[in-house]
C-alpha cells in the first residue's frame, strides 16, 4: 500500500535525505519512519486543512520554516483513513535554544483555536510548564498577535481574549498557560496538552494530571517542547529513550512523533557547519548564527565554565565533553540485569560527604570476564538544608527501594552498618573501603561487625591518590561497557553528576592524573558513585580471592 504524500512533507524529507539541512542521525531516522508510514499504511494528509492553517502565517509577521510546516502537516493534519484519527497525535520537539519552539507553539495554538479547526467545540489548548513565564509566553505572544493594530479589527471577529487566555469564538476553544501546580486541576477537559521545557520536570505529577484530562474531547493530542537540561532520570530521559527505540525500529511509534535536534557527538561541536543538527533554524537567521558562534568561542576557551553551550545550544546530554566522568551512553550501558550472586565474594565501598545530607554503600563484584556488578544503596536526610535543590525524582527512588529517606537530624552510621550486615549475610564481603576522613565517624560501628583498619585489618582508608590511580581503570570499564548496575537510576544520576579534574589544575601544571569532583556542589550529589569508586580501589582483593585457601587481606589492602 502506498499513500500520496503531501508536497510540504515530501520536500522536507528530501532536504533531510539529501543532507541539505544538515540533519542529525535522529532526523535521518525520522525521515525513514515517515516515508515508510506513507508507503505501507493507509494514511493521508488533509491538504485543504493544512493550507488553511498555513494561511494564518500572514498574521504572524513572518513565514514558517520548513521544519515547522513539516511538523504541522504531520501532527495536525495527517490521519488514519479508516478511523479519521490523527496519525501522530503526540509529538516531542527537542531543539537547541534559539530555534523558535515557543513561536511554533504559539502557531499551533493559533491553528487549534481558529475557525479552521473543526474537531469539536471546546477543544481547549493547555500549555503547561514549570513556571508561569514559560507557561504563559506562547499565550502572551498570541495575545500580542491578536492586538496588533493592523489586524486587530479583523481577528476580533474570530477571537476574544484577556490577559490570561484566548478563546476562539466559533469553536469555544480556550488557550491557557498552566504553571506547575498539580493540585486543584481535576475536571479539565483539554483537547491538547503542550508541555513546555519538560527538561525541568523531575517527576510525572503535573504531566499525569494533564494526561488524564485528555480523552474527553475528540482527537486528543499531547506535545513536549524542550531544550536539553541537567535533570537526569526524569521524564525527558524517558521520552528520549522511547524516541530512540522508535527511531531504531525496536518498538512501534504508537502515534508518537520524535523530532530531535542535537549534535551526534561532542566532536561535532568543533565544526560550526554541524550546528544545524541541533538547531534547524540556524541556517536562516544571521543574528542567531552570530550569537551562537560567540558562545561557541567562549566554550572553546573555557569548556568547564561554558558547559551550557553544549547542553542548551547543542542538546548534548553530558554537556561536559572531556571533563565527564563518563559519557551518558556509557553510563546507560550499565542498565543490565544483575545476576544471582549469593555467596559470591565482593568488596564494599562507603561514601558520604555529610551524614546530614547523603550517604551510600556499594557492593562490588568481579566476574570472570572482567564484568563488574554493583549493588548500590543510598540514604537521603530529609532535614538537609540542600534537599530543595535536588534536581532528581528522589521520592520515586525512595518508593522503589533504591534510596532510604531518613527523617532525622542525620543519617546514623548504624543504618549504614545494618545494611552492610545484610550484605555480609548474603555475600562473602572481603573488605571495606572508606574515605580516610570519614572513617572516624564509622569506626566503632564497623568494628562491631568485625571490620578493622591497620596492617592486618580488612578496612582500606581511601586517600586522594588512591582515587587518582583508579580513574584510568574506571575509564576503561565505562568505555568497554563492563559495568552492570541493574536498573538503578540513583547510581546513574550520581555518575552523571561527576566530573574529572586534573590533579594539578590549581597550580597550572598537568601531570595527566585526575580526581573526581561534583559538577555542582549542592544540587548534583555524587555519593552513590563515589561509594562505587571506593570499592574499585580494593578490587584486587577479588582477583586474589581463593575459595580453597586463606589470603592475607591486610597485606593486600596495605
Image (cartoon, rainbow, N blue to C red):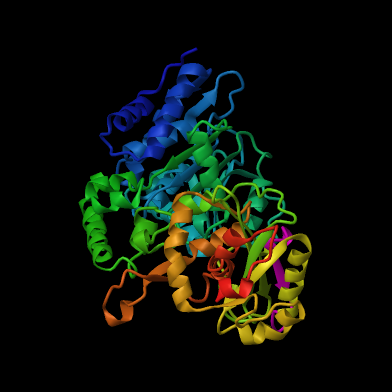
Quadrant assignment for the C terminus: bottom right
Task: Specify the farthest residue to the bottom.
Answer: 440
Q: Position of residue 245 (x, y in %)?
A: 53, 37
Q: Nearer the viewer, residue 289 or 319?
A: 319
> Could you tell me which residue is drawn at 36 percent across and 38 percent down?
67
Q: Position of residue 292 (x, y in %)?
A: 26, 57
The image shows residue 403, relative to residue 290, as above or below, that is below
Q: Position of residue 444 (x, y in %)?
A: 72, 85
The image shows residue 13, relative to residue 340, as above or below, that is above
Task: Specify the farthest residue to the top.
Answer: 1
Q: Nearer the viewer, residue 32 or 412?
A: 412
Q: Position of residue 378 (x, y in %)?
A: 66, 68
Q: Quarter-wise, where is residue 555 in the image?
A: bottom right
Task: Specify the farthest residue to the front.
Answer: 549
Q: Quarter-wise, where is residue 288 in the image?
A: bottom left
Q: Is residue 405 magenta?
A: yes
Q: Is residue 521 magenta?
A: no
Q: Magenta part of the protein: which range?
A: 397-411
**In this view of the protein, can residue 86 be seen by the observer?**
yes
> Could you tell me which residue is drawn at 63 percent across and 52 percent down?
487
**In this view of the protein, can residue 126 be seen by the observer?**
no
Amino acid at each position: 500500500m502506498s499513500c500520496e504524500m503531501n508536497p510540504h512533507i515530501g520536500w522536507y524529507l528530501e532536504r533531510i535525505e539529501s543532507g541539505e539541512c544538515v540533519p542529525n542521525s535522529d532526523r535521518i531516522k525520522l525521515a525513514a519512519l515517515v516515508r515508510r508510514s506513507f508507503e505501507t499504511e493507509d494514511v493521508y494528509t488533509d491538504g485543504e486543512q493544512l493550507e488553511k492553517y498555513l494561511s494564518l502565517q500572514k498574521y504572524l509577521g513572518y513565514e514558517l520554516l520548513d521544519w515547522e510546516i513539516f511538523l504541522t502537516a504531520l501532527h495536525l493534519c495527517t490521519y488514519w483513513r479508516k478511523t479519521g484519527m490523527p496519525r501522530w497525535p503526540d509529538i516531542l520537539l527537542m531543539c537547541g535554544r534559539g530555534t523558535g519552539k515557543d513561536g511554533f507553539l504559539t502557531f499551533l495554538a493559533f491553528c487549534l483555536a481558529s475557525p479552521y479547526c473543526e474537531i469539536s467545540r471546546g477543544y481547549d489548548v493547555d500549555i503547561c510548564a514549570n513556571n508561569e513565564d514559560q507557561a504563559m509566553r506562547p499565550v502572551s505572544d498570541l495575545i500580542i498577535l491578536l492586538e496588533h493594530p493592523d489586524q486587530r479589527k479583523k481577528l476580533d471577529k474570530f477571537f476574544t481574549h484577556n490577559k490570561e487566555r484566548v478563546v476562539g469564538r466559533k469553536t469555544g476553544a480556550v488557550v491557557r498557560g498552566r504553571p506547575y501546580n498539580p493540585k486543584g486541576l481535576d475536571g479539565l477537559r483539554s483537547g491538547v496538552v503542550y508541555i513546555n521545557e519538560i527538561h525541568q520536570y523531575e517527576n510525572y505529577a503535573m504531566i499525569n494530571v494533564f494526561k488524564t484530562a485528555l480523552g474527553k474531547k475528540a482527537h486528543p493530542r499531547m506535545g513536549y517542547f524542550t531544550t536539553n537540561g541537567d535533570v537526569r532520570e526524569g521524564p525527558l530521559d524517558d521520552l528520549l529513550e522511547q524516541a530512540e527505540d522508535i527511531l531504531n525500529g525496536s518498538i512501534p511509534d504508537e502515534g508518537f512523533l520524535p523530532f530531535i535536534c542535537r549534535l551526534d557527538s561532542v566532536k561535532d561541536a568543533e565544526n560550526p557547519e554541524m550546528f544545524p543538527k541541533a538547531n534547524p533554524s540556524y541556517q536562516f537567521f544571521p543574528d542567531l548564527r552570530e550569537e551562537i558562534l560567540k558562545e561557541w568561542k567562549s566554550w572553546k576557551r573555557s569548556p568547564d565554565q561554558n558547559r551550557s553551550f553544549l547542553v542548551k545550544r547543542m542538546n548534548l546530554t553530558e554537556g561536559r565533553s572531556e571533563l565527564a566522568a563518563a559519557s551518558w551512553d556509557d553510563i546507560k550501558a550499565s542498565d543490565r540485569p544483575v545476576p544471582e550472586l549469593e555467596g559470591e565474594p565482593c568488596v564494599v565501598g562507603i561514601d558520604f560527604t555529610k551524614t546530614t545530607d547523603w550517604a551510600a554503600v556499594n557492593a562490588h563484584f568481579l566476574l570472570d570476564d572482567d564484568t563488574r556488578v554493583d549493588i548500590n544503596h543510598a540514604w537521603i536526610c530529609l532535614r538537609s538544608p540542600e534537599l530543595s535543590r535536588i534536581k532528581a525524582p528522589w521520592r520515586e527512588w525512595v518508593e522503589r527501594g533504591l534510596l532510604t529517606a531518613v527523617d532525622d537530624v542525620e543519617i546514623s552510621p548504624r543504618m549504614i552498618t545494618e545494611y552492610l550486615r545484610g550484605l555480609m549475610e548474603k555475600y562473602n564481603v572481603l573488605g571495606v573501603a572508606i574515605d580516610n576522613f570519614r572513617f572516624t565517624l564509622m569506626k566503632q560501628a564497623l568494628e562491631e561487625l568485625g571490620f578493622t583498619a591497620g596492617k592486618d585489618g580488612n578496612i582500606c582508608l581511601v586517600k586522594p591518590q588512591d582515587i587518582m590511580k583508579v580513574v584510568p581503570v574506571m575509564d576503561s570499564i565505562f568505555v568497554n561497557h563492563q559495568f552492570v548496575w541493574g536498573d538503578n537510576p540513583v547510581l546513574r544520576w550520581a555518575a552523571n553528576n561527576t566530573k574529572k579534574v586534573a590533579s594539578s589544575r590549581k597550580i597550572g601544571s598537568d601531570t595527566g592524573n585526575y580526581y573526581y569532583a561534583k559538577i555542582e556542589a549542592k544540587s548534583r550529589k555524587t555519593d552513590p558513585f563515589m561509594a562505587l569508586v571506593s570499592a574499585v580501589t580494593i578490587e584486587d582483593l577479588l582477583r586474589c580471592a581463593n575459595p580453597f585457601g586463606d589470603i592475607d587481606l591486610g597485606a593486600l589492602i596495605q
